[in-house]
């Protein structure tokens, strides 16, 4: 479990990375990189990025994520139907501001089951195995506790070892019914630690995102300046 202390340390460490030029993630991150990664909650202004993330999943991943091989249209309908007021979406961005991992915590719409929520997650293929799925799960658990949720459900196909591993490690009970499995995790009530952790984590993630935006703007601008320079040099050479 992430504590406020590790979050503060992470915020200092994160700052060192920002102003390096973006490169391919896999070049920079070894397979088992540290899993201390800023996760921010996402609002409706990020709908396009959510859609891009989900559309990038191949048929097998869509099947694992939604329980059926969702078509592009079904994904677009899912994204436009997201209820940001009721539910929570969490995301991990890379330095190119691409959403490489996201989770959807859907709170129950049934007033009788107000204390239940369902968790769904996806991580882009190139970013898997770094602990992002597990971290998004932890983040959703903290938030769910702070929202008064006492039971979190995960619907997964029985073949989905990675998802079931994440749930099992967090202490969830897993009930297998043939090709499908239901996992449920009983959550303790919110306390000072859960509230502080979420508050700090959200603040760090917002700062991280703002820095990424600035760094991207800087590198985009530098790219334009270099292109103009190249153009001037080429036309001078042609004279
Ligand atoms: C499930 C998913 C989110 C996992 O994301 P991830 O970031 O790769 O997961 P993590 O790195 O946090 O790994 C979680 C655990 O699963 C294990 N794992 C990861 N990939 C695995 C694989 N292909 N096979 C077996 N175990 C795997 C990890 O070793 C880790 O276990 P450990 O802590 O005991 O080492 C990702 O594979 C995915 O997006 N799949 C498609 C969508 C999906 O299945 N969503 C879940 C249903 S809602």
Image (spheres, helix red, strand yellow):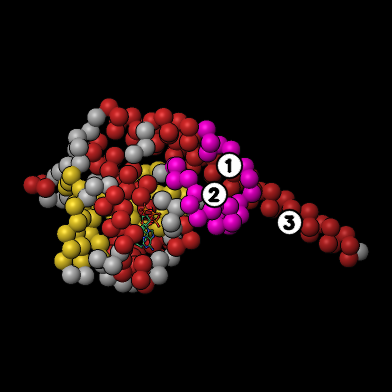
Q: Secondary structure at mark 1?
A: loop
Of callouts 1 and 2, which one flags the residue occurring earlier in the amino acid sequence?
1
* Predominant SS of the magenta segment: loop
Q: Which residue is mark 3?
A: 227
Quadrant in which the C terminus appears: bottom right
Q: Secondary structure at mark 2?
A: loop
Spatial separation of the CA atoms under disc 3 and disc 2: 21 Å
| Residue bounds of the magenta highlight | 12-38
Spatial separation of the CA atoms under disc 1 and disc 2: 9 Å
Front in this rendered view, residue 178 or 221: 178
Q: Position of residue 184 (x, y in %)?
A: 19, 52
Q: Which residue is mark 1?
A: 17
Q: Residue at x 37, y 44 (%)?
A: 41
Tell which residue pokes out farthest to the left in this image: 112
Q: Position of residue 24 (x, y in %)?
A: 58, 57
Q: Residue at x 30, y 64 (%)?
A: 160
Of callouts 3 and 2, which one flags the residue occurring earlier in the amino acid sequence?
2
Foreground: disc 1 or disc 2: 1
The answer to whether 105 appears left or right of 109 in the picture is right
Front in this rendered view, residue 183 or 153: 183
Queried whether the magenta region covers residue 27, the answer comes back as yes
Queried whether the magenta region covers residue 103, the answer comes back as no
């Amino acid at each position: 479990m992430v504590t406020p202390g590790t979050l503060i340390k992470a915020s200092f460490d994160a700052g060192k990375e920002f102003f390096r030029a973006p490169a391919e993630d896999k070049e920079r991150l070894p397979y088992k990189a540290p899993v201390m990664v800023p996760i921010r909650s996402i609002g409706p202004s990020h709908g396009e990025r959510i859609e891009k993330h989900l559309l990038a999943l191949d048929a097998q991943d869509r099947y694992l994520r939604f329980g059926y091989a969702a078509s592009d249209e079904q994904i677009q309908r899912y994204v436009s139907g997201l209820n940001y007021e009721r539910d929570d979406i969490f995301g991990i961005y890379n330095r190119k501001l691409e959403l490489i991992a996201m989770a959807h915590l859907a709170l129950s719409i049934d007033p009788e089951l107000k204390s239940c929520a369902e968790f769904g997650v996806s991580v882009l293929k190139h970013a898997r195995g770094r602990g992002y799925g597990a971290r998004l799960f932890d983040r959703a658990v903290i938030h769910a506790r702070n929202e008064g949720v006492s039971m979190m459900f995960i619907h997964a196909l029985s073949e989905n070892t990675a998802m079931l591993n994440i749930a099992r490690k967090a202490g969830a009970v897993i009930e297998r019914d043939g090709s499908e499995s239901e996992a449920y995790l009983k959550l303790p009530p919110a306390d000072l630690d859960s509230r502080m952790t979420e508050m700090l984590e959200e603040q760090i993630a917002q700062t991280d995102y703002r820095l990424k935006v600035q760094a991207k703007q800087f590198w985009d601008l530098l790219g334009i300046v270099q292109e103009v320079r190249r153009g001037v040099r080429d036309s001078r050479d042609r004279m």
